[in-house]
Image (spheres, grey):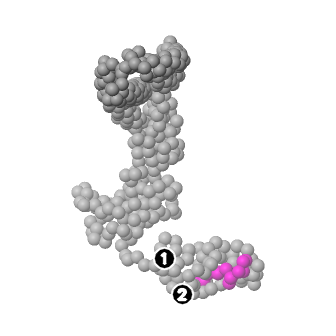
Amino acid sequence: NAPGVVTHTAQGRAVVTPPVEGKVTRLVATIGDRVRQGEPLAIIESADLAEAVSAMTEAQSRRFSSEADLRQAESEFQLSTARLRTAQGVLSRQLELARAGAFSQPSLQEAEKELNEAESELESAQKEEVVHRAQLERAERLFTLDLISRSELEQARLEVEQDRIRQEKAKRQIEIARKAYEREKQIAEQGILTAKEVQAAEAEVRAASLEQQKARIAVEAARAALQGARKGEQSAQATYAALKGSGNRASGRFVTIVAPIDGTVAERKVSVGQAVERSTELFEVDNLQTVWVTASVPERQIAQVSRGAAVTLTTTAYKGRTFRGIVQVLGSRLDPHTGTMPVQCLVLNSEGLLRPDMFAQVIIGVGSTSLALAVPEAALVREGEESFVYIEEAKNIYYRKAVKIGRSQGGMLEVLSGLGEGDRVVTKGAFVLNSEAQKGELKGHAD
């Protein structure tokens, strides 16, 4: 039997601080409120969060721009590849004619070149329309976010319209060039091709190949830029997440501070409008489902105490009420002033009645633990030396059974004989039943 003091467990108390500097704009919880983990306690406005939001927006804009640049570079690479294939086809045909000893007039090559250029122009306009439409979609998103002006949006729309006009013009040019090519072809069948045309085709292949290489390099550079933009965006998002803190919720420059544990708000240390730093204590939340009770065991009784021993305790505040726990930690040294050893007991406190710094009288079990059949003390009826209980035989029908009682502990009595496990014993109203039984009116009586 030792005096004890109630304290928090390590998980039973949380001091809530803000993850970022700012100003308190709203207090959701007050002292005495019961809160669940994740429920809001306060809202803070932070300039650091506002800067982080701006950085995320800029990083996202850079990513959008890099994606558009990559699409344009890939389109130009595809266009250069198509031009190279066209040039290689022209050269192949020229070489075949040269090996066959055939020559034609230069005008045939010129007509074919014009046809190829018209077809390339159409393909280029179509490719650029794809790029400009993607840029227009990006511009519309940025305009919605107020990141670009209306004139920039209209310029993007104008570029798409110009691409459409170029395609119509290129189609008309193809029709003209094809007719000219067919006419020159008929003429060429009667004439010769000059060696100069073969050389021109070879030069065209070399130029197209060089253009393709440049386009490939541009694509690789655009991909690297996009990768960098994505990393920048991820870094900005990570910075924002770190500023809002784990578990808290944030929106723009505001962060909602939430309860880190289930419990009751024990202290609220700030007011609306107050400037706070990361070290400022906002709230204290207590979870008293389990508490530590530190008992001071006299030196002469230390040897009787062991870890795992059962504990019961009482308090002045709750007379007649007992609480149960178990010995968890034995002190490593004695208090030099009192000559006692601190023994930490983990005690169940589901109703939250035990409060920190409350004094208690602790009873630490020092014997061995054994299982026994037991009934509540209220179930036992004594008559002289005889003890008995009432057992429910059927609904509203009871009979008296003599029992032999052994040890008592915590309001329970050990039954040595007379009962079996599973018997339904009356625990409330047994004395009423006994009085009725003495009158011969036991049957039909309802508890």
282 shown above or below 407: above
* Magenta residue check for 389: yes
Give the SS element for disc 2. strand
Q: Give, as a three-letter code, the residue at label 2.
A: Ser
Quarter of the figure that contains the N terminus: bottom left
Say which residue label 1 marks: 408
At x 57%, y 84%, the residue is 420
Q: How crowded is mark 1: few (under 14 residues within 10 Å), some or many (20 or more)?
A: some
> In the visual, does 165 lie left or right of 191?
right
Q: What secondary structure do most residues of the magenta stretch adopt?
A: strand
Contact flag, marks 1 and 2 (Cβ < 8 Å): no
Q: How crowded is mark 2: few (under 14 residues within 10 Å), some or many (20 or more)?
A: few
Say which residue label 2 marks: 417
> In the visual, does 28 lie left or right of 103?
right
Q: Earlier in the sequence, mark 1 or mark 2?
A: 1
Can see residue 132? no
